[in-house]
């Protein structure tokens, strides 16, 4: 992908799940929308947020309102009762396959997922069924907009639709919805037919929330992170390496009930955002957004893509014969050139020289310097001194 100052760009979608993911995407949207070259990538770059907490969605100022989706505004208990066959219809195996029979869903509407993964997944499933929230419809419109033939800035040589999926594995919304959403996006991009999907997950680990979560809830977020990583590792290992399974049962798209199995790993690459041991970070969302911006819209990406290609041969085997290796650490370091400070310093030096040469009688130039301190000059009449000073000036 080109940099923002380049000529050609790949269609890029930034999708945020939960409060953490939505904040990161909103920050990236703010950065890009104020960039002087935004007009070139506007039709190619889109921002979407899906959350179970309305307050978090309302705080997003740079994601379009029609691209923000609340996934919790329904009666979960009544809905799951129907899916379990406890009401007027029979059991729906597409839901009961992954919902524990003993679990009782929360009654609250519009509230968050309560750091419960299955609550988030049910909310996403409900809204995708019959496309109740029009998430699928909107994504299809954005895909059509990003791939319009008349766009002169789109990369037509390497037809890739880049999707960056952000979320936290600590709470309920991101950790419960990131896998179904990853498979849904891959399926939609493939079915759309313009180019191949390249899906990258940027997932914040529970360690990044230690300072924000009360001690009595920290075991909960650690459990969410562990369960999410176990699911991600299982799908990646089983569907991405020799000796794995041809397919795994995974119900992610109620709009296409025939899609009951997946046969490929959910992400091309996953960045795991961890708590650094030697660096203090106050605002993780801001740090992830800054790193994403630099990695995607700077020459860094070209260098990274070359490294990905070189490492591909090392990603064919499991690490320690047990673990997949499609993970990476996330972050950037930056040496910032103090341009404004340097310009200000140079300006002050120039002004000082101008004052010295043009207002202080030439400084050291003998043709303009008034010979103050010279005994011969000091013996002259004051009017004669003034006349010499005027001539020098």
Image: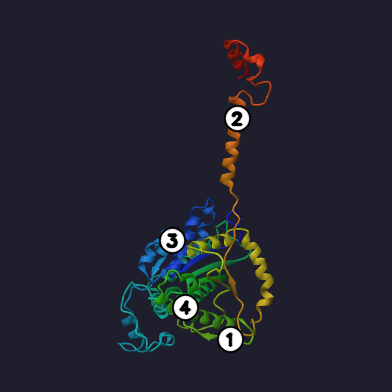
Q: Using the rendered image of the protein, determine whether residue 314 is visible from the camera's viewpoint.
A: yes
- Contact check, label 3 and label 1, Cβ < 8 Å: no
Q: Using the rendered image of the protein, determine whether residue 139 is visible from the camera's viewpoint.
A: no
Point out residue 156 in the picture as x, y percentages from the top left corner.
Answer: 61, 62
- Contact check, label 4 and label 3, Cβ < 8 Å: no
Foreground: 149 or 390?
Answer: 390
Point out residue 202 in the picture as x, y percentages from the top left corner.
Answer: 53, 70
Q: Pointer 2: what residue?
A: 354
Point out residue 250 in the picture as x, y percentages from the top left corner.
Answer: 49, 83
Instruction: Report the Cα–Cα distance between label 4 and label 3.
Output: 30 Å
Secondary structure of the residue carrying tag 2 is helix
Q: Pointer 1: what residue?
A: 246
Res. 157 mark? none
Colour approach in the figure: rainbow
Q: Quadrant of residue 368 in the image?
A: top right
Q: Pointer 4: what residue?
A: 222
Q: Earlier in the sequence, mark 4 or mark 2?
A: 4
Secondary structure of the residue carrying tag 1 is loop
- Contact check, label 4 and label 2, Cβ < 8 Å: no
Point out residue 62 in the picture as x, y percentages from the top left corner.
Answer: 43, 58
Q: Earlier in the sequence, mark 1 or mark 4?
A: 4
Nearer to us: label 4 or label 3: 4
The residue shown at (60%, 36%) is 349
Foreground: 324 or 334?
Answer: 334
Q: Quadrant of residue 86 in the image?
A: bottom left
Q: Pointer 3: what residue?
A: 63
In the picture shown, does residue 337 fall above or below 178?
Answer: above
Nearer to us: label 2 or label 3: 2
Q: Earlier in the sequence, mark 2 or mark 1?
A: 1
Instruction: Report the Cα–Cα distance between label 2 and label 1.
Output: 77 Å
Instruction: Report the Cα–Cα distance between label 3 and label 1.
Output: 38 Å
């Amino acid at each position: 992908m080109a940099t923002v100052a380049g000529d050609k760009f790949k269609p890029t979608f930034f999708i945020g799940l939960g409060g953490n993911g939505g904040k990161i995407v909103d920050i990236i949207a703010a950065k890009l929308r104020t960039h002087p070259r935004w007009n070139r990538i506007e039709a190619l770059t889109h921002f979407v947020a899906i959350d179970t907490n309305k307050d978090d969605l309302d705080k997003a100022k740079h994601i379009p309102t029609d691209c923000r989706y609340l996934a919790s505004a329904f009666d979960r208990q009544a809905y799951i009762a129907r899916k379990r066959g406890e009401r007027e219809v029979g059991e729906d195996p597409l839901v009961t396959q992954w919902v524990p029979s003993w679990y009782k869903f929360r009654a609250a509407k519009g509230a968050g997922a309560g750091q419960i993964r299955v609550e988030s997944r049910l909310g996403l499933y409900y809204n995708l069924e019959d496309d109740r929230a029009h998430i699928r419809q909107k994504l299809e419109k954005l895909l059509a907009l990003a791939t319009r033939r008349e766009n002169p800035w789109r990369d037509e040589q390497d037809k890739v639709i880049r999707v960056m999926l952000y979320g936290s594995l600590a709470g309920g919304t991101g950790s419960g919805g990131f896998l179904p959403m990853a498979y849904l996006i891959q399926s939609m991009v493939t079915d759309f037919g313009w180019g191949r999907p390249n899906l990258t997950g940027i997932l914040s680990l529970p360690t990044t929330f230690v300072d924000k979560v009360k001690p009595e809830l920290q075991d909960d977020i650690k459990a969410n992170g562990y369960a999410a990583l176990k699911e991600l590792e299982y799908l990646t290992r089983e569907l991405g390496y020799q000796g794995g399974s041809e397919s795994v049962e995974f119900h992610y798209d109620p709009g296409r009930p025939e899609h009951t199995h997946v046969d490929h790993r959910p992400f091309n690459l996953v960045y795991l955002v961890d708590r650094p041991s030697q660096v203090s970070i106050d605002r993780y969302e801001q740090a992830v957004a800054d790193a994403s911006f630099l990695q995607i819209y700077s020459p860094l990406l070209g260098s990274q893509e070359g490294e990905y290609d070189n490492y591909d041969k090392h990603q064919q085997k499991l690490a320690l014969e047990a673990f997949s290796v499609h993970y990476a650490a996330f972050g950037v370091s930056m040496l910032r050139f103090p341009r404004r400070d340097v310009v200000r310093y140079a300006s002050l030096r120039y002004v000082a020289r101008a004052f010295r040469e043009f207002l202080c009688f030439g400084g050291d130039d003998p043709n303009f310097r008034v010979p103050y301190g010279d005994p011969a000059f000091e013996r002259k009449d004051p009017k004669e001194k003034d006349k010499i000073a005027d001539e020098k000036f």
